[in-house]
Image (tube, grey):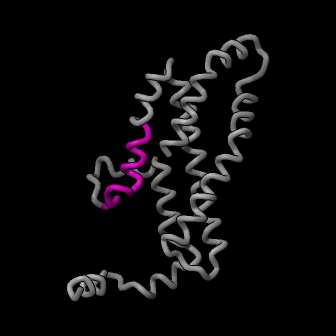
Amino acid sequence: LMSNMFNTILVFQAERDVFLRENANQMYSLGAYYLSKNMIELPTSIIMPGLQLFVIYFAVGYRADNWIPELFQIWLLAFLITQCALSYGYFVSCSVPNMESATAVAPLLTMPAIMFGGFFANSQSYVAFIAWLKYISPVYYANCGILIDPIHFDRARERLPRDGSQQLDDHRDG
């Protein structure tokens, strides 16, 4: 999330003055600029998550049987998170006047998304008045999609005890 967003911030801030001048001269519309920027970045936002996930998928120990649909599902979620990061980058770049301010404001937007996305704490342990923030975090939805495998959810449910007692017994014995 952070690397894709900062790449967008740095590139857009460098192009910002040229874009504002050309837009003021009505050389092209805002929609045409945004669409062309997204199309240019599309190969990178498709290939890079795919390469990372192809290595990580097998290193983590996901099942080797029927791996293509699962890998595609995780890749799709990574691609969507990349698109969210690019959008965050454009939002921050358009909201602040210079690169220094943009790089200072960007973590204020992304860190809550990461914190409430479920990386650092279980979402059930949040205080009630901030628990709703997880629903506006794209990281939360990506985690839900990656951690809950909808293709084999029933098989995983049969293997694991509902209350975790077997895992605790195994831990005590070890």
Q: Who's the residue at 42% across and 29% down the image?
A: 105
The x and y percentages for residue 77 are: 58, 58
Q: Is residue 134 above or below residue 149?
A: above
Quarter of the picture containing the C terminus is bottom left
The x and y percentages for residue 81 are: 55, 50
Q: Who's the residue at 56% across and 25% down the image?
A: 94
Quarter occupied by residue 73: bottom right
Quarter occupied by residue 75: bottom right
Q: Who's the residue at 53% across and 38% down the image?
A: 5
Query: What is the residue that sits farthest to the right in this orientation?
Result: 27
Q: Is residue 147 above or below residue 21?
A: below
Q: Total of numbered circles in the picture?
A: 0
Query: Does 83 appear in magenta?
Result: no
Query: Does 123 appear in magenta?
Result: yes
Quarter occupied by residue 161: bottom left
**Left or right: 29 in relation to 16:** right
Q: Which residues are magenta?
A: 109-124
**Left or right: 85 in relation to 173:** right
Query: What is the residue that sits farthest to the left in this orientation?
Result: 172
The x and y percentages for residue 13 are: 57, 24
**Left or right: 32 in relation to 165:** right
